[in-house]
Image (cartoon, rainbow, N blue to C red):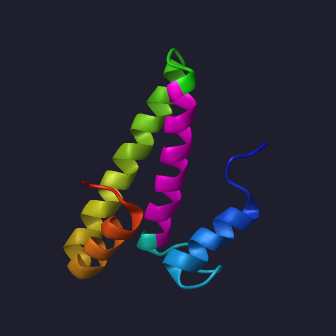
Amino acid sequence: MPYLTVEKKANIFKEFGGSEKNTGSVEAQIALVTERINSISAHLKQNKKDFSTHRGLMKMVGQRKRLLSYLSKTNLSGYRALIEKLGIRK
């Protein structure tokens, strides 16, 4: 069973991107990557020796970091609202 269904993706894009069609907005991309990171983190808690998945997780964390860096440079208030909404950067 896929962890990220079409409906779930559409909800993420609707909530963070403004519409289901706006898949390219930075906020929607960050929210989608965060959802994938949370899912893979839960998988790795049960499968501690799954090193290939761990590498994929690290790549996603780096991608999210780059996207967040871009967002903080272009739209600081949007960046602060997004990290508050997603619950990252405690």
Name the residue: 33% across, 56% down: 88
Residue 14: % across, % down: 60, 79
The residue at the far top in this view is 49
Q: Is residue 36 magenta?
A: yes
Does 86 sit left or right of 90 as displayed? right
Residue 70: % across, % down: 28, 66
Q: Quadrant of residue 77?
A: bottom left
Name the residue: 44% across, 44% down: 60
Q: Is residue 75 magenta?
A: no
The dominant secondary structure in magenta is helix
Q: How many marks?
A: 0
Residue 79: % across, % down: 28, 72
Quadrant for the C terminus, please: bottom left
Q: Quadrant of residue 6?
A: bottom right
Magenta span: 28-45
Return the residue nearer the eye: 66 or 38: 38
Name the residue: 74% across, 66% down: 7
Vertical position of residue 88 compared to residue 61: above or below: below
Residue 78: % across, % down: 30, 79
Quadrant for the N terminus, please: top right
Vertical position of residue 15 compared to residue 4: above or below: below
The residue at the far right in this view is 1
The residue at the far bottom in this view is 18
